[in-house]
Amino acid sequence: MQTVPLRFRELTTLVVVVLALGITAFAADIDGTWTATFDTQIGEQHYTYTFKADGDKLTGTVKNDMGETQIVDGTIKGNEISFTENMKFQEQTVSIKYKGQLDGDQINFTREVGSFATEKLVAKRQKAK
């Protein structure tokens, strides 16, 4: 009678480990460089995002025509990502909050630029040359 529950526990543990590894592997799929060009209230913007996932934590940088900054409060859960960019604009720091959905080699973002605007954009993965 002991072997059946023990095997069941072993099988359950194995399934949990495999699922956890699968989720981690999927989250890591965001690693790399992504670019986007889109129109805003202040004109056309050119962005380069560099992402690195570690479990559900997302780190990296955001670079645009005005400079470069570190990603803050980045998370990744499945194919949902979010982070904040604290951009310097005219001697002020503007908090830009991103929410996006990873879809293969593109990320569909909605970003809230302070209390000024909400914008949609698509970032595309840059392939290694």
Image (cartoon, rainbow, N blue to C red):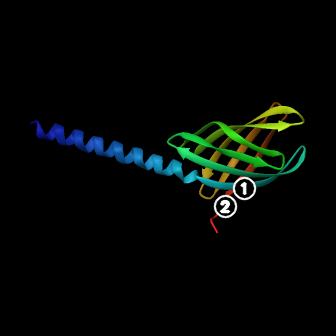
Which residue corresponds to the image point at 61% horizontal and 42% vertical from the top-left?
59
Q: Is residue 33 left or right of residue 7?
A: right
Give the total number of marks visible in the rendering: 2
Residue annotated with mark 1? 35
Q: Quadrant of residue 117?
A: top right
Residue 122 is situated, as x and y percent measured from the top left of the image, at: 72, 53
Three-letter code, disc 1:
Thr
Closer to the N terminus: mark 1 or mark 2?
1
128 with respect to 27 (left or right): right
Whether 109 is drawn above or below 104: the answer is above
Mark 1–mark 2 Cα distance, whole angstroms, equals: 7 Å
Judging depth in this view, the residue of 72 and 14 nearest the camera is 72
Looking at the figure, which quarter contains the N terminus?
top left
- Say what secondary structure mark 2 lies in: loop
Is the residue marked by circle 1 packed among few (<14), some (14-19), or many (20+) residues within 10 Å?
Answer: some
Q: Position of residue 24 (x, y in %)?
A: 46, 46
| Residue density around tag 2, few if under 14, some if 14–19, many if 20 or more, within 10 Å | some
* Residue 12 spot, x, y in % from top left: 28, 41
As drawn, the label of residue 88 is none
* In this picture, residue 42 sits left or right of residue 103: right
Label 2 sits on what residue type?
Answer: Gln
Residue furthest to the left:
1
Label 2 near label 1: C-beta < 8 Å?
yes
Quarter of the image with the C terminus is bottom right
Give the residue pinned by disc 2: 126
Residue at 77% x, 51% y is 47
Please tell me in which quadrant of the rendered image residue 73 appears: top right
Compared across the picture, whether 65 is left or right of 129 comes to: right
The location of residue 29, given as percent across then percent down, is: 54, 53
